[in-house]
Structures are given as structure tokens and as C-alpha cells.
Image: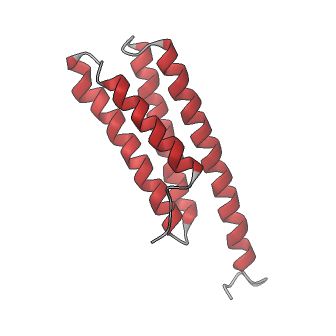
Amino acid sequence: MARYQHLPIYKLSYELLLRVMLVVKDFPRDHKYTLGQKLRDEILSLIVLVYRANSTEHKAQVIANILEKVLVVELLIRLSKDMRIISIKHYAGCVEMTESLARQAEGWKKSAGKSLKNFESPAGQRE
């Protein structure tokens, strides 16, 4: 089993989950079990994808899914701010974290692409 808990992207995803869990508990009831639950679920899915990307040889598609999840999380956080459910302070902190997650995932995607090219022969076949 591949180790993933040491990865900066995993640590930051987990920190985001902790922050969102604390913020969502103060959501109004009518948003806590809809928007709040969706936000928690998306971040949990993001953490699972980080594990999957670290465990597979074919990382590119999983990392693309990570980037998509980050966009969904950013959208839900922005919606929460626009609806005045979360404060600007929490919004800014969460967006800073999601932007960092996206940068890390992009770097991981580039790195995975380079390592894949290193294993290919000139004819495009794996050795």
C-alpha cells in the first residue's frame, strides 16, 4: 500500500476538511444538510482521489479528477460566501487552500507526465 499521509497535497486537503467541518457546523439548518453536506462530501472525495493518485501508475486521469473536485469545492465555498453563510475571513482562508491544492495537483500532473515519458521508448512503446 502506497503511503500518502506524508504528501503535502494530502495534508492540505485534510486541513481544508477540518476547517470546513468547523465552518459548516455554524451553517443555518436549511443549508447545513444540503450545501454543507455537499461541501464535506466533495472534500472527502478529494482526499480519496489523492490516495488513488498516489497508489496508481496511471496518475494523469486521477489528478485531472482531483483538479475537477477542487473547482467544485471552490464553487461551493464561493456560493456559501455569496449567500452570506460564511464570513469573508473563512472564505479567504478556504480559497487560499483550494488554490494551493490546484497548484500542487498541476505540479503533480506535470511530474507524472514527465515520469511516464521517461519510461517510453522512442517508438512510443513501454519497455
Single out the residue that lies furthest toward the right. Answer: 122
Query: Observer-nearest residue: 100 or 22?
Result: 22
| Relative image position of residue 118 (x, y in whole percent) | 75, 75
Q: Residue at x 50, y 28 (%)?
A: 94
Single out the residue that lies furthest toward the bottom. Answer: 127
Query: Observer-nearest residue: 46 or 20?
Result: 20
Q: Is residue 116 above or below residue 67?
A: below
Q: Residue at x 69, y 60 (%)?
A: 111
Q: Considering the image in quadrants, where does the N terminus appear?
A: bottom left
Q: Residue at x 32, y 41 (%)?
A: 41
Single out the residue that lies furthest toward the front. Answer: 6
Q: Considering the image in quadrants, where does the C terminus appear?
A: bottom right
Query: Observer-nearest residue: 17 or 112?
Result: 17
Q: Is residue 52 above or below residue 101?
A: below
Query: Observer-nearest residue: 55 or 5?
Result: 5
Quarter of the image holding residue 37?
Answer: top left
Quarter of the image holding residue 121?
Answer: bottom right
* Residue 41 relative to residue 81: left or right: left
| Relative image position of residue 48 (x, y in whole percent) | 40, 54
